[in-house]
Image (spheres, grey):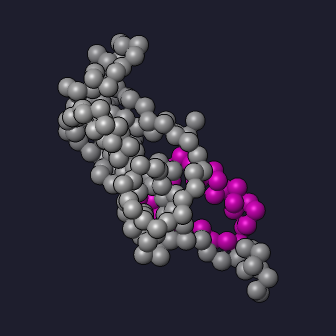
Amino acid sequence: MISDISDFNIGQVLIGTGTTAGIYLLPELLGSFKTDYPKVEIKLQIGCSNFIIQRLLNNEFDFAVVGEGLDLDLDLISKPIAKDELVLIVSPNHPLAKKQEVSILDLCNETFILRERGSSSREVFENAVIKKNIKINVAMQFNCEEAIKKAVSANLGISVVSNKFP
């Protein structure tokens, strides 16, 4: 019935999301949404932010949830829905683990393991170090934060990851 559609009681919602939001933010929000609108089918696609934005521009999603920091000049409306911060992670055996405070200059000679290009968290971090005229050595890149954490714990490098929407 038309009244069901206008009341948002049936139908389908196509959502694109960046990896971090798709794992740590949206499941809880979508759980609440499904409680309120049990007949609405939700389709969620998780990927790097640039990929999600391109698919949104191609009208493949109704809306998208991605991190900030993407250098895109697009005619899109965006609204912040959560705050997040990036944090440095190192192995407990790494010399930086013993420091109370780490400066950006401490990162100059380190080997980094980062998210893939197109990830908003990588864009934010790289833009921050570029502003400080710091060059970093990216030895590995992954599209999965858990893989990054495992690589860091195996002393393959250090990383900067999301603090999961505190």
Q: Residue at x 27, y 45 (%)?
A: 141
On screen, residue 61 versus residue 36, left or right, reads left
Residue 35 on the magenta segment: yes
Residue appearing at x 38%, y 29% in the figure: 88
The image shows residue 31 at horizontal and vertical percentages of 66, 56
116 left or right of 16? left
Q: Is residue 44 visible?
A: no
Q: Nearer the viewer, residue 57 or 143?
A: 57
Q: Position of residue 80 (x, y in %)?
A: 57, 51
Q: Is residue 145 above or below residue 92?
A: below
Is residue 51 visible to the viewer in this orientation of the structure? yes
In which quadrant will I find the N terminus? bottom right
Which is more toward the observer, 156 or 126?
Answer: 126
What is the x, y in percent for residue 24? 53, 46
The residue positioned 47% from the left and 76% from the top of the image is 59
Q: Is residue 78 above or below residue 85?
A: below
Residue 19 in percent (x, y) is at 44, 52
> Looking at the image, is 135 positioned above or below residue 33?
above
Does the segment drawn in magenta span residue 103?
A: no
Start-end of magenta stretch: 22-48
Locate the C terminus by quadrant: top right
**Which of the 4 image quadrants contains residue 89?**
top left
